[in-house]
Image (cartoon, helix red, strand yellow):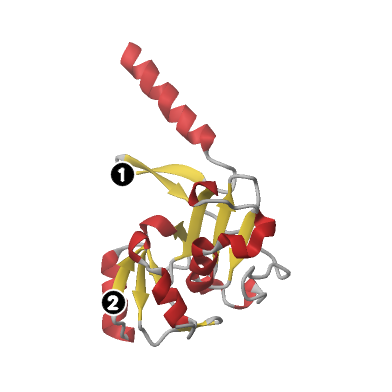
């Protein structure tokens, strides 16, 4: 009985800890977080100042621990901010510990997913509003299927995307 009460306490704590922009649901025998990217017709990309609603399959966002939410028109733009947040000092990010959630849109399903668990395709024929970009997918299998259809040179996990690649995509090398 004691173990059951402790398990219920831990589960309820996890559910209450989520912000209202995300919710946890049971999927099979585990809890998965469903993410949301809420924006309107006036929401623009921090990096490129483009309207998000025009290209919803590319949208990304970062929630900062200070309460600010930053939107991006593509994964490439999101990584630009991620690697060099001091360039946008007004956001108040000092280190990567200041990020609470990093979310991208799954290119196939158009659903928001955890960027840190996503797979990013480099070198495909798909072009975002920011130009050559990284295409995000929830699973490696979906990324591989996309590469077969749309081309692509490589698939990266979040932690393997180098800043040099973002510079290359921006023709900054």
**Quadrant for the N terminus in the image:** top left
Residue 132 appears in the figure: no
Q: Position of residue 77 (x, y in %)?
A: 53, 71
Rendered residue at 55%/55% (across/down): 36
Residue furthest to the top: 2
Rendered residue at 29%/40% (across/down): 29
Distance of mark 1 from mark 2, alpha carbons?
31 Å
Decide which of 53, 152 is in the foreground and name it.
152
Specify the quadrant of the image occupied by residue 124.
bottom left
Residue furthest to the right: 42
Instruction: Examine the rendered structure and indicate whether residue 163 appears above or below residue 151.
Output: above
Instruction: Examine the rendered structure and indicate whether residue 97 appears above or below residue 144.
Output: above
Residue under label 2, please give it: 154
Residue under label 1, please give it: 28
Residue 94 appears in the figure: yes
Q: Which mark, residue 129?
A: none
Counting every numbered tag in the picture gives 2
Q: Which label lies toward us, 1 or 2?
A: 2
Q: Position of residue 117 (x, y in %)?
A: 36, 56
Disc 1 element: loop
Which sits earlier in the primary sequence, circle 1 or circle 2? 1
Instruction: Examine the rendered structure and indicate whether residue 105 appears above or below residue 35.
Output: below
Contact (CB < 8 A) between labels 1 and 2? no
Q: Position of residue 66 (x, y in %)?
A: 64, 45
Instruction: Examine the rendered structure and indicate whether residue 29 appears above or below residue 71.
Output: above
Decide which of 24, 166 is in the foreground and name it.
166
């Amino acid at each position: 009985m004691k173990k059951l009460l402790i398990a219920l306490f831990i589960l309820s704590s996890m559910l209450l800890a989520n912000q209202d922009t995300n919710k946890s649901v049971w999927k099979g025998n585990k809890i998965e977080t469903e993410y949301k990217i809420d924006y309107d017709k006036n929401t623009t990309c921090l990096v490129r100042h483009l309207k998000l609603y025009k290209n919803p399959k590319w949208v990304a966002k970062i929630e900062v621990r200070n309460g600010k939410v930053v939107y991006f028109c593509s994964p490439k733009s999101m990584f630009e901010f991620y690697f060099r947040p001091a360039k946008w000092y007004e956001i108040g990010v000092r280190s990567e510990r200041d990020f609470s959630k990093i979310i991208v849109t799954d290119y196939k399903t158009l659903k928001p997913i955890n960027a840190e668990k996503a797979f990013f395709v480099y070198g495909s024929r798909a072009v975002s509003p920011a130009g050559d970009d990284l295409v995000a997918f929830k699973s490696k299998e979906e990324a591989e299927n996309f590469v077969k259809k749309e081309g692509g040179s490589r698939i990266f996990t979040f932690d393997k995307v180098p800043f040099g690649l973002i510079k290359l995509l921006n023709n900054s090398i």
